[in-house]
Image: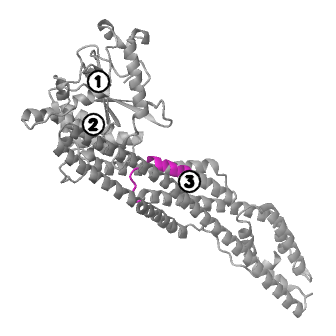
Amino acid sequence: MNRLAGQQTGFALGNTIESKTKGIWMWCVPHPNKKGHTLVLLDTEGLGDVKKGDEKHDTWIFCLAVLLSSTLVYNSLGVIDNMALEKLHYVTELTENIRVKAEESQDENESADFMSVFPSFVWAVRDFTLQLKKEDKPITSDDYLEGALELKNGSSPQTVQYNLPRRCLRNFFAERKCFVFPRPASTQNMWKMEELTEKELDSKFLEQANTFCHYIYNNSETKTVSGSRTITGTALGNLAEVYVEAIRSGKIPCLENAVVSLAKIQNVRAVEEALQLYMTEMFNSVQLPMCPEELSNIHTDAEKAAIEVFITVSFNDNCQIYQKELMGKINDEYQQMCQQNYDASRMQCEEVLHDVFDALEKGISDGSYLKPGGSQKYIDMFRQLAEEYRARTGSQIMSEEVLSKFLKTKENIGKMILQADQSLSAAEQEKEGEKMKTEVLKQQKKSLKKQNWLQEQMFKDMQRTHDEHVIQITHQMEREQDRMRRDNKRVLEAKLRESQALLNMGFQREAARMQSEINRLKADMDKEKSSQHSKFGQVLNCIGIATTALAPGFTPKLVGVGISMASNFV
């Protein structure tokens, strides 16, 4: 185990009769071959310690190792014989202590269910001194294991007992591998194994140890549970807690129930972590006020990163309940950020407006425009100051909004100045009134254009949100479906091998039952394949509905301003 971790020391190597490891110890190291993966090593206490006096304790340790591993390494001393297999009686109790489905199946043989979720099995034989030969012909260590697992014909109690552990290993573990290790050092040096250098170790032991490590690195799959759903590091810890709690409460650990419990834990955490990342990314990148397109781009990048976190951490969110929850919470945060952007823009525009129009306010206060020709002077001044204002606030989203609101406050002043201008005839006043109406329409068009632009921006954001969720959930589903196909293929191939082996050993009846299992498995695989399109359609529909539901509440809370007759001054 220490060699798998790339270390000389780590897990304690006992050199006395006293057991060192208690329970299950865990060691996590970066995977040497797979980027972005962690190699999790679980070292269990020795099974069969007479001092414990609790055989059920060992059974649960063995069951937990099976449930938490993607590759189960069982090590024994000397040879694989009937005594060694009898010591591995824990494997015969797996169906009594582990349940795959919440409801007990009426199927007499559930080996396909167990095989699909159980790890691959590696038997490591330590201090092996025999020659790998059979009938004077060399055999591999795998041949040695499979030969030891051959069944005997007959129905006597002794034969049934002899076949029981062998049947379990054959039926529950689709992939079986064997490594035989010679004694690593002399008896005296065995007492100080952790201190020995590689030069002091047996060369054949080192060769076999390196072969073993490379096999584990290259062939151990990522840990999954029912439905070929990948387990992350935190999820593995939560899964262990779920299983241990079931054992402590006197229940049988059930993989289907564990998936449900784990989903609740993981999905709540997935929403929290994804939302936190989104908010952090937004706060670190946003400087208000800013252009809405720029804010939208920052939102898009932050949302993409948040969805990636959610997809990584979430688990078994089949109906996209938690994904829709995340969509809603991100949408709420984005709306608040947009509103803060509008408020910040409005404040800056109002500051500029007060500065620019200060001269106009002074003219109104001292009556400069309440004289013959004052209306034209007022209009000219207003237009000049409006251009200056726009030049200073042109990039601000609230520029026209603030100016329109200001014009609204000057509506009565404009009318009063126009009526007080004695230099205008009745016809000229009527003409000026028509100009005012035309200017009102122009300003209304500007306002509508801005509102339409904001609406278009909103729908672009919604479309990008929808597309990003679809892209990432599609990739996740494709990965899960690919893994499920590989798992089903692995089980199917194992069943086909076992069927042929049973025929070769003369177990025609068992081979016929195995063929029935194979046929059922093929039918299930075909059914799963045909349902993939509908599952994908359901997911797209859920995301589409969630996106549509967000749209009505997305429009920012802008201040509505009536267009006054004073708009003609702009």
**Residue at image x 82%, y 87%?**
434
Say what secondary structure mark 2 lies in. Answer: helix
Give the residue at mark 2. 64
Mark 1 Cα within 10 Å, few/some/many (few <14, many 20+)? some
Give the residue at mark 1. 21
Give the residues in magenta.
303-319
Whole-percent x and y of residue 146? 26, 31
The amino acid marked with disc number 3 is Glu
**Residue at image x 56%, y 53%?**
303
Location of residue 499 (image quadrant): top left
Mark 1 vs mark 2, CA separation in Å: 15 Å
The amino acid marked with disc number 1 is Thr
- Residue situated in front as seen by the camera: 547 or 79: 79
Say what secondary structure mark 1 lies in. Answer: loop
Q: Is residue 316 magenta?
A: yes
Whole-percent x and y of residue 102? 24, 52
View extreme (front): residue: 136
The amino acid marked with disc number 2 is Leu
Location of residue 379 (image quadrant): bottom right
